[in-house]
Every structure is written in C-alpha cells, then in structure tokens.
Image: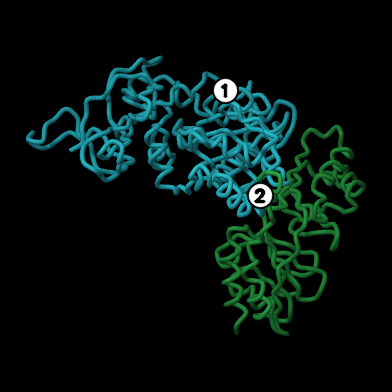
Amino acid sequence: MAAELKLERGRPLDGFAEELSKASSDAVRLQTAPARSVINLRGTADESLVTDAQMALGVELPLMPNRWHGGERMAAIWLGPDEWLIVAPQGEAANVEQAMREARPNDPWLSLVDVSHNYTRVALSGPSARDVLAKGCALDLRPDQFATGDCAQTVLAKAPVLLRALPEVDSFELWFRNSHAGYLAVWLLDAVRF
Amino acid sequence: MPRRLEKSTSRDRTRRFLNRMYTNNWLKLPVGKVRYGIMCREDGMVFDDGTTARIAEHRYLMTTTTGNAAAVLDHLEEYLQTEWPELRVRLTSVTEQWATVGVAGPLSARVLAKLAPETDFSPESFPFMSWQDATIGGINARIFRISFTGELQYEINVPWHYGESLWDAVMAAGAEFDIAPYGTETMHVLRAEKGFIIVGQETDGTQTPYDLGLDWAVSDGEGLHRPSLTRAGGLPAVGPQATCGPHPGGPRHRHSGRHAACGVGKSDPPPVPMEGFVTSSYASPALGGCFCLALVREAGIVTAKSSRRRQRSGGSAGAGKDLRSGDVRQGRSAARWRLN
C-alpha cells in the first residue's frame, strides 16, 4: 500500500470556486489566488539586510511600514519593524532560505520560516472592490489612502487578514488563515451583493 | 489541535530564552527530542503548558494550549522586546502551516509503519518524547512521539494543504486494525485518567505548578517564575490550595465546579467547610461511575522542599495517578476527601 501512497494537495476554497466565479461581475471580481511559496523573514532591519536581500532575492525589503515591494514573481511584504513575508514562485521556499543564508553567513539573528501553507489568498478587483471591503473593514481604503504598494494587517468581518493593494487599479489581495477560508468566502459571497 | 510557534535563531540564546519562560530546565535538550514545559507568569501562576521540540541546532517548535496560542505569542514577544532584546530570538506563528493527525493506541506504531515505511518505529529507534523527519506519500512530514492521551501515540505533521489527504491515508492504513476516529471528549477522558491537566480547565490563573502536583517540572533555574515562587513570605493564599487527582467510583456523573467537602459527613450541620472544587468530571464505563479531577485544600502529606511549598501545595494526592496502570508518578499519600 505504501508504495502507491501519494498525498494530494487540497485547497480550502475548492468547494467555493464556482460560486466565487458566479458571484463576480463587472463591478467586482473574486478569484482564488494560485499557490505560492511564502517565507517569514525576521532580522534586524538595517541597510545591509536590505542590500543582501536585494542581491539574494532580487527584491527590496520595505523599511516603510505597511508597504510591499516587488511584483508577480517575487515580493516582500512589511509585517513589522523586523518582520517581512517573502513571496516566491511555488516550490522555491528552500531556495529562498538558502540564498539568504548564503548572503548572510554571519547573521545569527536571521530567521527564515516556511509559511507557504499558512494562508489562503483571494484576489478582489473592480470598481466596487473597495466598497465590498468597507462592509467589513474599518480601514480608510480610499485610493488616496490605500493604493498600489500599500499593505495592512487588519480585520475583515472579524477575521484577521493581510490586505495588499496590487498594481492594477482597484485590485486587492486578501490573505487569511486556511481555517477562516470557508467563513470569509461565505462572507464575501454575501458582501458582493449590493 | 495544538497551536504552534516556530522559533528560529542563533547560538545558545533560544534555549536560554526557553529556560526563562518555562519553569523547567531547557539547557540540555538535544536536536530530535521533545520536552514538556510549564509556563508561568511573573507572579508564579501557571499560564500555559505544552511540548517544545528541538528541530535543528538553533530552531525549536513550541506547542501551546489550543486557545492560548495568540496570548502565548504576545507573552513571548513582549519579553523579547522589553526585557531581553539582546537574545534576539525570533518567533513565527506556524499554527496553520502544519496539519496534525494524532494516531493513538497500542497498535499505532503498526499503522505508522505502513504510512512511513522508511522510518524505524521500534522504541529503541523512536523513543517517547522524540521526533523524526519522514516521508509520507511523497510529502515531507514530521512525526512526533508524544502523547496527550497517555496511550502509545504519534502525531504526524504535514504541510496544511495535505492534511485532509493524510487523514484519508491514516484511516486506510488503519482499516485492518479497526482504526476509529476519536473526538475531543474521548481525548479529555483519556488525559484525565492519566492526570494530565488542561490549562484553563484545571487552572484559572491562581495555581502554581506546585498546586498542580507539577513539582517535577520546576527547576532551580532562571525562570520567570522563580522570584515569586521562592521569595520569603511567599504568596498570599488565594482560594483553595490545590491538589489534583482522579477520584474513581461514585455516581456516573458529577458537575465540574461542584464543591468538594473534606472530613465531614452529610449530616454535619452547616456551615460545611469548602475544601475545594471539581475541575473536570467524566463518566467512565471502565470504572462503572464517574471520576474527577479536583482542586482540594491540604489534601494529604507532603514532602516539601520549602515552607512555601508546604503552605501552598498542601498535597498532591493522586496527582498523575494513572487509573489504567496504577502507576503513581507523583507518589503522595491518598487524600481523604469526598464529594458532597
């Protein structure tokens, strides 16, 4: 039996994919985001850490609170004064850790932890996206206050989320715990109805 | 499911941090081993408990009481930021990075052997309170030999998104042994039979480790609890002094929170002295009645190391008494108390 045993990857929103797609309109689109490698990086924030991360990962760690840098392939999201999330293509977590360790061989304070499976992500876009989020989030999300390159750890409909403004206009990404995925999917399906 | 924090850092500072945050000694935990720890607040009262595994030279995986993970993370982070920033220990929550399936019972090693054929599950190669990397169905897993049920038990961790698939694989592998899912009630009955506490159930923030019969988990090290638990004059008495012990027999069920009286008969005139209260109560088909864990004042004889302990702990009658094997880990005299 063990010879043919193969564990299959599940996704907490599999059961909602069709509903999310059906609920989407020109005003607001909902879709699950593809799996990525995510690494929690904690280290003393200084110029050398930023330079080394740039060299090793090709992305600049933001030192400004609530900002993220990078693009589709690699990104660095500010979580705290000494904490970031590194987003990389799926399966690259070990490579990210190795590259950073090699770039900082004498940094005993550097912590890299694979958290690729810690989150479920949903993309939300369209002219009404901000209004949908405003139904459950107290942050000021007007375009002059929260736009491309911004991110925030906040609460949506009582669930802790990481909210990221994507480069496209009126486009956001929600990160939340896997165990909150069903709850937030149901909430979003309701919230997109005006 | 236990909650998890992964701590990754440097040199020997993480184990020094653990040594301060837990009441027991963490300086000699080798890579591959797991240790149980009691976490106290500065006032010496039990705040959390759980197991921590040494994952690598400078990396540890801590589990906390299920509902207490966020509070523990805040607690640890606060001390790192305000008291010992020089330790530079880094914490990362990995609560949902991992999915865990616990496989418990005398045949559990045979189920595990089918799932991870490359791993040697003999007790010599895979002793209690150790963990190993393994491959299950092509996925990297961590297997911990730890037990909250008191049975031979393994906890399999896989990346979260493989959790459901792992569950199906465990059930399929265990089918020939009549494997069955068990719920939290079963788990709680089993742990209570072993005398294992649940922080928040046996405790309400006013119990020291001594009150709970956990003297064995308190070292003379540098823990946060030390000043409060050792200072002259000691702690003020706060409610029932504690003891914790299974109490077999009697009716099928008692209610938690029901007071226990000591040394008096039912016909004694009021006021009946209140000597403690039941913290956990379960029906036991094996015993033909209910059994309880209770906090009881001055329950028996105590071998105390200090006046603090004598005054505070009174006794730990039956603490850790295993109802199944008769094993008494905390050998203390039996308490003569009964439930009204």
Q: Nearer the viewer, residue B84 or A2?
A: A2
**In the rendered image, the vertical position of residue B303 relative to residue A146, given as above or below:** above
**In the rendered image, the vertical position of residue B49 relative to residue A28, given as above or below:** above
Kindly indicate which chain is depicted in green in the rendered structure: A
- Element under disc 2: loop
Relative placement, left or right, of B270 versus A182 is left
Q: Which residue is painted at 78% across and 38% down in the image?
A: A110
Q: Nearer the viewer, residue A177 or B105?
A: B105
Where is residue B189 shown, x and y percent of the image? 38, 41
Which numbered disc, 2 or 1, marks the residue that appears first in the sequence? 1
Location of residue A97 (image quadrant) = top right
Q: CA distance from mark 2 to mark 1?
A: 28 Å
User: What's the residue type where badge 1 is placed?
Assistant: Asn
From where the camera sits, is residue B104 visible? yes
Q: Which residue is painted at 69% across and 74% down in the image?
A: A30
Q: Bin the neighbour count of mark 1 within 10 Å (Cα to Cα): few under 14, some 14-19, many 20 and up.
A: many
Q: Nearer the viewer, residue A20 or B43?
A: A20
Q: Chain of mark 1?
A: B
From where the camera sits, is residue B1 visible? no
Where is residue B64 shown, x and y percent of the image? 54, 40
Where is residue B284 shown, x and y percent of the image? 31, 40
Relative placement, left or right, of B332 versus B46 is left
Kindly indicate which chain is depicted in cyan in the rendered structure: B
User: What's the residue type where badge 2 is placed?
Assistant: Gln
Q: Which residue is mark 2?
A: B97
Q: Which residue is mark 1?
A: B25
The mark found on residue B184 in the picture is none
Where is residue B117 shown, x and y percent of the image? 67, 37
Q: Which residue is painted at 12% across and 37% down in the image?
A: B271
Q: Nearer the viewer, residue B191 or A86?
A: B191
- Element under disc 1: loop
Q: Bin the neighbour count of mark 2 within 10 Å (Cα to Cα): few under 14, some 14-19, many 20 and up.
A: many
